[in-house]
Amino acid sequence: MPEIIQFTGTVLTGPDSEARGLWSINGRLTFRQPAKAPDRILAGWVLPGFVDAHCHIGLGVGGAVDAATAGDQARTDLMAGTLLVRDAGSPADTRWLQGGSDFPVLIRAGRHVARTRRYLRGFAEEVEPDGLVEAVRKQARDGDGWVKLVGDWIDRGAGDLAPSFPAAVVRDAVQAAHDEGARVTAHCFAEETLDDVLDAGIDCVEHATGLLPRHLPRFVEQRVPIVPTLINIATFPDIAAQADPKFPAYAAHMRALWERREERVLEAYEAGVRIYAGTDAGSVITHGRIADEILALHAAGLPIAAALDAACWSARTWLGAEGIAEGARADVVLCREDPRMVPDTVRDLAHVVLGGRLVR
Ligand SMILES: [Zn+2]
């Protein structure tokens, strides 16, 4: 028996567009009222399921976690309304989470690719510059259309952040991924790393804390989005405090990046750079915090409609997922109030529907 769910209340088909009268029949959305009475009626403000554009499922503080833990992580995200995850690197094989109706839709990036001993232990496939192109090619084949590069990290010899790889090698690696039909995103904290990855034709940048005015027109012209992960950047002062005794210059750099984090996101938004919401859950950041990131983007100065859009309509379009449309997969969340008027309502959703199944 196909289940029919009727959604009463306002349907937000876009940040500024509304409709009324929506049903889920057999897991698909329709605006046409079915002849049969609904099995369930759900009330609230209906939005497409949230997108966490930077999340790590299968990753914990020590590296890969077991399957049960990975499943718990994915379910925690699901219950918070994240129905689509772009995984930004995981050492665990999480393909088993895909294709069913128990977990968020998962777009995998394979393993992070980092410079040898220049990232968190146990997270990445670590290579020297002469191995980067092959490593990226392999991850491009293993993942779901994305490759994650660790673009910079502390260089302990220099005592500060520094790009992980020479610019020319990054360019070849991005080209190799593109040849394999994959897009590349890069973890970038430092200013100069952004020049290198933009030169290389990168497809997305994570964190982008080192954003300077010279970078803005390039992000716009090259149509490169930013996933700021503000709730993770909030941990920079802790990282700096730990690093202070041995690496004072690095610590000072991290603090300076932290201090300007909000104004840089706002400058990017105002310049026309596309911004998407990502929590960076998986190691230090716990899962299920997409609402916190939406609200952090709003607190940085983005209008609430734009902060919601960063996790909703535009984010789904960017990743090739359906929104709220006739025949689309019924992946929606219901807020208790209009989230454009009462932003905090995203913290406590009324309902979560995944593939037409009520999960909350
Ligand atoms: Zn991350």
Image: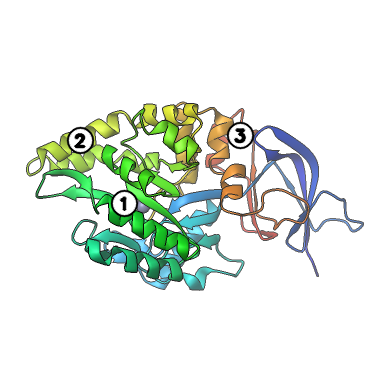
Q: Earlier in the sequence, mark 2 or mark 1?
A: 2
Nearer-the-camera pick, 238 or 260: 260
Outermost left residue: 245
Q: Residues within 10 Å of mark 2 (few under 14, many from 20)?
A: some
Q: Amino acid at mark 2?
A: His
Residue at the image position 53 percent from the left and 40 percent from the top: 310
- Residue 279, position in %: x, y? 42, 47
Q: Secondary structure at mark 2?
A: helix
**Disc nearest the viewer among 3 and 2:** 2
Q: Which residue is mark 3?
A: 339
Q: In this image, 241 relative to 195: left or right?
A: left
Q: Are marks 3 and 2 in contact (CB under 8 Å)?
A: no
Quadrant position of residue 184: bottom left
Q: Residues within 10 Å of mark 1 (few under 14, many from 20)?
A: few
- Residue 296, position in %: x, y? 44, 34
Q: Which residue is mark 1?
A: 284
Q: Give the Cα separation between the discs numbered 3 and 2.
A: 36 Å
Q: Earlier in the sequence, mark 3 or mark 2?
A: 2
Residue at the image position 90 percent from the left and 59 percent from the top: 36
Q: In this image, 190 relative to 291: left or right?
A: left
Q: Which residue is mark 2?
A: 253
Residue at the image position 58 percent from the left and 66 percent from the top: 102
